Image: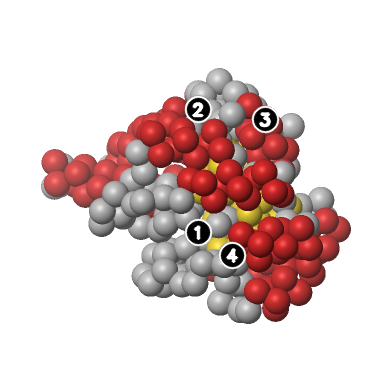
Amino acid sequence: MPVTSTKRLVTEAMAGGYAVPAINVVNQLTLEAVLAAAQELRSPMIVQTSVKTVRSIGLEVLKAMWDTTAARVDVPVALHLDHCPDRQVISDCLAAGWNSVLFDAHELSVEENERQCLEVVAEARAVGAHVEGEIEGIAGVEDGIGSDEQGPIQTLEVAIGFVERTGVDIFAPAIGNAHGMYKAQPVLDHGRITDLVEATGIPMALHGGTGLTAEQFSDLIARGCAKVNVSTALKIAYMEANRAYLTENPTAADPPKLFAHVREVVMEMTRTHIRLFGAEGRA
Ligand code: 13P
């Protein structure tokens, strides 16, 4: 059974000292390429969909794409809804069979976020799904969600209380990481991951995976970041592969040849991250 629970994937990763790549896909080509790379390197994989992708493809079509494509691999994989402040989209994805959701209510007060997150956790549990929680905005705009400004960082005590009271399965803290391209090498609060994992016992999600160094990944993964999110790297690989192919072949008129080129570039980006996260051969 290739499709498995997100919680199982991250729990095994945390115990094994590696991280599950959590890669945002944008269409069928990228979904298939990411899963094909996971299959080739025997890696577990979390495929992420932004709210924008759910809306642009349509929930039923996207879920059908997932079901048929995931059925072709035999490594454990899960489908995750990334940053979602919209309760209706959360409910729709949970009802349709997404394995997990990130309820992103960092724009609400922590109290209101906690109140609603408890409802999301109950809704997810009812269908055997899992929840990632967030109380601080991760800097940078991702598919129309978020802000370039780093919002307030909560105290460790507030973060631990949120995790304990809501029962979220994964937590996404802000530690100086950001979505999009880093303009300078970020200074990350590695110790906050250790403190949160020691206090809560649950795995952390590392957002803003594009552009971090191998050393940053291995240190944060060793501290308990068992899910590492990558989105911008896929978008860049996809766009640049299209651009490069069409620049080299300006009169090209055979779309499958273009698709094959783009697929290989997206697969290579995925292989790189699987290896960086120590996930190769874990499935
Ligand atoms: P990047 O776009 O920086 O890789 O971040 C991805 C992410 O954190 C998705 O939630």
Q: Callout 3: helix, strand or loop?
A: helix
Residue 174 marker: 1
Q: List x then y, in percent, for residue 271.
A: 42, 30
Residue 155 marker: 4
Camera-near label (4 vs 1) is 4
For marks 3 and 1, the one nearer the N-term is 3
Q: Are marks 4 and 3 in contact (CB under 8 Å)?
A: no
Camera-near label (2 vs 4) is 4
The C terminus lies in which quarter of the figure? Answer: top right
Q: Residue at x 30, y 54 (%)?
A: 182
Q: List x then y, in percent, for residue 149.
A: 38, 72
- In the picture of the structure, the residue carrying the numbered disc 2 is 278
Q: Residue at x 34, y 52 (%)?
A: 186
CA distance separating discs 3 and 2: 13 Å
Answer yes or no: disc 4 within 8 Å of ligand 1. Answer: no
Residue 30 marker: none
- In the picture of the structure, the residue carrying the numbered disc 3 is 15
CA distance separating discs 3 and 1: 23 Å
Q: Residue at x 44, y 28 (%)?
A: 275
The N terminus lies in which quarter of the figure? Answer: top right
Q: List x then y, in percent, for residue 196.
A: 63, 50
CA distance separating discs 4 and 3: 27 Å
The answer to whether residue 251 is left or right of residue 33 is left
Q: Are marks 4 and 1 in contact (CB under 8 Å)?
A: no
